[in-house]
Image (cartoon, helix red, strand yellow):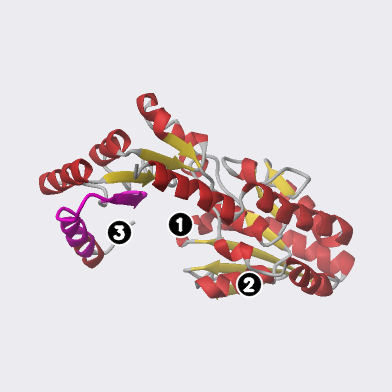
Amino acid sequence: MFAYPLVQIKLFFVLLSRLFDQKSTLFIQREIFPRKVGSIRKAILNRLFSKHNVIWDFDDNIVDMNEISSFEFEALSKNSSAIIVCNNFLRNLIDKEFHQKVSLIPTSDTACSVFDFEMTKNARVSDYEKIIKLSWLGTFNNLKFLKNILPDLENSAEILKRDFNKELQLKIISDIELDIKCRHIIILNIKWTREGSIKELLDTHIGLMPLDNNKLTEGKCAFKAVQYIGFGIPVIASNIGFNKEVIVDNLNGYLISENEAWIEKIISLSTNKELWLEFSKNSRKRWIENFNTNDILSKLKNHFGQNNK
């Protein structure tokens, strides 16, 4: 996570400064130190735990990603007053001895609270008969998952053009570009920025979240899928991990177990406007009922309140 030496040095001095603060609550996201923890850092970590109240947000499977040392993982599991995870897979990575202080709180995005769904839906409808806009968000580490289904997206684009006179557009919103030429699908590489990604999602018909099936993907918190449904976007995603909690198959999207199904489901949502509208409304409804920011913030505030008593 902290890939650059200057960031590591800055973090080291921030932690040093906390040793002299009055007792407070420290909110730690993912890990404190990158991978290896030396003896000096161990001493700092132990001192922090003895002096402060620690709430640990254990986000993604950073254990199998080797982002966290065994010492730090064990220290955070043992000494944190509260541990927040987004799914049961992550909860089960923590020793059962500490499960009583683990809370399942899903991720969310505040931007999903402050847009006009009806206006956005109407704008998408106006484009629907001419062009279907797919969006994929992710980092360079996850681009391989999109590449795996690119032949299916290309075949979908060919069918839509040939049989329905529609174009299929794929927006890749990322920190890296996909340098590939396709005959049928229109690929737009869009450099990720916070504001830019929101703008693109507001102009999206279908969100994509392909994944492989392994321990790393099982630990993902499906943040991109939560963003998609928050903006009222039907999602087509791999039937893996927390995707199954965000997407209800055939209600607000499709869960894919076999690669061939990508074509069928893309064509289905791209040619049946009433179905697409129903899925869109259901996505928004599911976000409001299960992933809305206000409810999640309330749960987090309760944690801070309880652990400051």
For badge 2, the amino acid type reads Glu
For badge 1, the amino acid type reads Asn
Q: Residue at x 44, y 46 (%)?
A: 60
Residue at the disc numbered 2: 200
Is-magenta flag for residue 24?
yes
Residue at the disc numbered 1: 141
Number of residues whose C-alpha sits closer than 10 Å to that of mark 2, classed few (under 14), some (14–19) or many (20 or more)? some
In this picture, residue 173 sits left or right of residue 251? left
For badge 3, the amino acid type reads Phe
Is-magenta flag for residue 159?
no
In this picture, residue 264 sits left or right of residue 113? right
**Marks 1/2: CA–CA distance:** 21 Å
Image quarter in which the N terminus is found: bottom left
The boundaries of the magenta stretch are: 10-32
Q: Earlier in the sequence, mark 1 or mark 2?
A: 1
Q: Is residue 144 above or below residue 200?
A: above
In this picture, residue 304 sits left or right of residue 32? right
**Marks 3/2: CA–CA distance:** 28 Å
Pointers 1 and 3 in contact (C-beta within 8 Å) = no
Number of residues whose C-alpha sits closer than 10 Å to that of mark 1, classed few (under 14), some (14–19) or many (20 or more)? few
Q: Earlier in the sequence, mark 3 or mark 2?
A: 3
Please give the label number shown on residue 2. Answer: 3
The secondary element bearing badge 1 is classed as: helix
